[in-house]
Image (tube, helix red, strand yellow):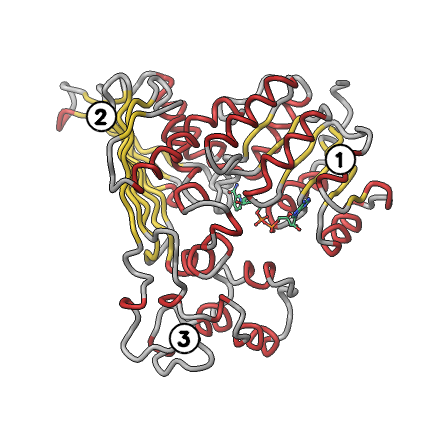
Amino acid sequence: MENSEPVRIAVVGMGARATIYAREALTHPDRMRIVAVADTDPAHVRKAREMFNLPPERCFSSAEAFAQAEPFADAVINGTMDPLHVATTVPLLRRGYDVLLEKPFALNRPQADELLACARETGRTVMVCHVLRYAPFYRRLKELILSGALGRILNIRMAEQVSYFHASVSYVRGKYASPEICGSGMLLSKCCHDIDLLAWLMAESRPARVSSVGSVFQFTPQGAPDGAGERCLSDCPVERACPYSARRLYLEHPQRWAANIWHDSGMPAHAPLDEKERLLRNPDNAYGRCVYRQNLRIVDHQSMLVCFENGATATFDMNGGASASSRLIHITGTRGEAAGRFEDGVFTVSLISPESRGGRRVETVTLSPGEEGDAHGGGDQLVVADFLTLVRGGIPSVCCTTLEDSMVGHCLVFRAEESRAQGGAMLPYEG
Ligand SMILES: NC(=O)c1ccc[n+]([C@@H]2O[C@H](COP(=O)([O-])OP(=O)(O)OC[C@H]3O[C@@H](n4cnc5c(N)ncnc54)[C@H](O)[C@@H]3O)[C@@H](O)[C@H]2O)c1
């Protein structure tokens, strides 16, 4: 491809995520141009048509309809929901497109194998939106490991705390609480980023065994406050004292994730408050229902242990319902350690140093202002830039999340869920 031309991108599934990626065409028109949209929701097609000034013949009513048209774009961004990822990407690869695909790229092992086989057969590239790899915090940790400064890595400890307001809006009341909509449990839908990071950082060895336990600890009818009703705004006498009150979370403090509710309900974010209240009062609306009476079928906390072929180990804990969202990491190597909290944009490197005071040399790595980025540390923008490099035939960054590379993390999750179903049995990894 002629390097000076912007890459022509078609967007399939113009929802919340794809819109973030597609906007890069507005900030960097020299690098990327949106030339088509495909979405089953006419309102989302209209939004893209207006944003990118698309002619009607470049607007499609589904991914399937777009894949039937003669190719006219260089590559595709696929932002459909999880259960559609493989079904919609396979025809695109067969049409000759490279695809930037949202995570999780597949819901189970057979789907993952199908996609990988298709990518190999067609010779096309699938890059997965594991955007956290691109966040400078994790990229610097990866570079530190690659530099050899920590020696050989013997253990990685990671944890993800999911705040009470994010957990309740997305994983208790929202679409990721429902395997019918998102197709999986929380380890895949939420934590596949973290497990991908774990496998990527531990890349000097492959996983050998994995086990996992987890359950619904908190969001059960037994966990409800005494006297709690079924719906926060209709019949709950203890609503004012409940941290999960839909009124408190979504009407009084809407800046914390409530935007997802209005987006998923097809309501403009600027809709009047009384309209939003009516929506939450609607007996069919899950966002107004008591968090303890959702009949939750996914976990609210889960732990995982991975043993690697070279004897190294890793653990991961996810706790939903924490006071704040955060991601913690502690890497131990034979020459030193690195530890930090993603949200702080700072990690500490502590190297074995017998001559130094205290027997170690400590250095603090602080990301510079502007490097810290948003909730994904700027990864949303950087993953698109790397995808464009790949499509142009350039050399992608160390963070690049090709399908083959992303398989390890996903396969770990698939095995971990099998282990959890068996009460935490230690299972051989099948990669
Ligand atoms: N990388 C991340 O950090 C991150 C964060 C959140 C969500 N996600 C993932 O991003 C994906 C999209 O999430 P979202 O919140 O943007 O969802 P969304 O519901 O806002 O967007 C999905 C879009 O796909 C469209 N669609 C449905 N069927 C279609 C079809 N057959 N053809 C074309 N379009 C179709 C829908 O109308 C909608 O516009 C999910 O897989 C989700 O798990 C990733």
Is label 3 in a helix, a strand or a loop? Answer: loop
Q: Amino acid at mark 1?
A: Arg
Callout 3 crowding tier (Cα within 10 Å): few <14, some 14–19, many ≥20: some
**Residue 88 at what x, y percent from top left?**
65, 37
Confirm if mark 2 falls within 8 A of ligand 1. no
**Residue 259 at what x, y percent from top left?**
56, 60
Q: Earlier in the sequence, mark 1 or mark 3?
A: 1
The residue beneath circle 2 is 361
The residue beneath circle 3 is 230
- Is residue 135 toward the left or the right of residue 148 in the image? right
Name the one closer to the observer, 177 or 30. 177
Is any part of residue 337 visible from this angle?
Answer: no
Answer with the quarter of the image where residue 238 lies.
bottom left
Q: In the drawing, what numbered circle is on residue 33?
A: 1
Residue shown at 72%/23% (left/top)? 96
Compute the Cα span from label 1 to label 3. 48 Å
- Camera-side mark, 1 or 2: 1
Confirm if mark 1 falls within 8 A of ligand 1. no
From the image, which quarter does the N terminus lie in? Answer: top right
Is any part of residue 326 visible from this angle?
Answer: yes
Residues at marks 1 and 2 touching, judged by CB atoms closer than 8 Å = no
Name the one closer to the observer, 171 or 163. 171
Is label 1 in a helix, a strand or a loop? Answer: strand
Q: Earlier in the sequence, mark 1 or mark 2?
A: 1
Q: Earlier in the sequence, mark 3 or mark 2?
A: 3
